[in-house]
């Protein structure tokens, strides 16, 4: 009887772990509102506030269903995204972008005719 009880307990625990493991949302790390904190222009990093641009002109809002709102230069674009743990693939105004994700920061890197600019975003909620 002891072996049957232990076997039954192991089966119940295994089933519970499988069921609870399936419910976790892989996007949960990035779900929320992201605002710019720094900008790197031609290799020089400055705080975003020093640019004199309002924070509501740039940012992202990610939802757990794979949808997002990207605001770039004050223009909102509704889109979808894919998060793989180290980056976010997103399409903004018909163009594909990859945002790097590391240690709670998202980085959008842009190349304007050889001039490299990147913005780092942090989650506020």
Image (cartoon, rainbow, N blue to C red):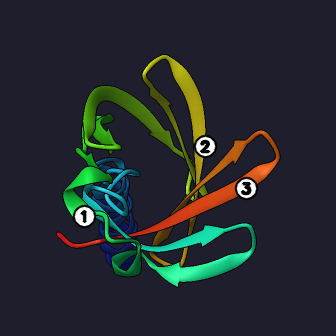
- Sequence-wise, the earlier of marks 2 and 1 is 1
Point out residue 32 in the picture as x, y percentages from the top left corner: 22, 58
- Which residue lies at the image location 82% right of the left edge and 46% below the top edge? 114
Foreground mark, 2 or 1? Answer: 1
The answer to whether residue 65 is above or below residue 6 is: above
What is the distance, in whole Å, between disc 2 and disc 1 at their CAs? 21 Å
For residue 12, which quarter of the picture?
bottom left
**Label 2 close to label 1 by CB (< 8 Å):** no
**Label 3 close to label 1 by CB (< 8 Å):** no
- The reply, left or right, for residue 14 in relation to residue 42 is left
Residue at the disc numbered 1? 55
Point out residue 98 in the picture as x, y percentages from the top left corner: 61, 43
Residue at the farthest top position: 94
Viewer-closest of 99 and 74:
74
Q: Secondary structure at mark 2?
A: strand
- Which residue lies at the image location 31% right of the left edge and 58% below the top edge? 28
Residue 37 numbered mark, or none: none
Residue at the disc numbered 2? 98
Residue at the disc numbered 3? 116
Q: Secondary structure at mark 3?
A: strand
Q: Residues within 10 Å of mark 2 (few under 14, many from 20)?
A: some
Point out residue 72 in the picture as x, y percentages from the top left corner: 36, 42
What is the distance, in whole Å, between disc 2 and disc 3 at their CAs? 15 Å
- The reply, left or right, for residue 36 in relation to residue 69 is right
């Amino acid at each position: 009887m002891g072996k049957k009880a232990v076997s039954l307990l192991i089966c119940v625990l295994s089933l519970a772990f499988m069921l609870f493991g399936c419910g976790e949302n892989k996007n949960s790390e990035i779900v929320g509102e992201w605002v710019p904190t720094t900008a790197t222009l031609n290799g020089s990093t400055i705080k975003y506030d020093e640019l004199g641009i309002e924070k509501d002109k740039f940012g992202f809002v990610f939802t757990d269903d794979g949808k997002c709102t990207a605001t770039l230069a004050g223009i909102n674009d509704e889109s979808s995204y894919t998060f793989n743990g180290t980056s976010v693939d997103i399409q903004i105004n018909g163009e594909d972008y990859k945002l790097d994700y590391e240690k709670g920061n998202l980085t959008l890197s842009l190349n304007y005719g050889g001039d490299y600019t990147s913005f780092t975003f942090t989650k506020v909620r």
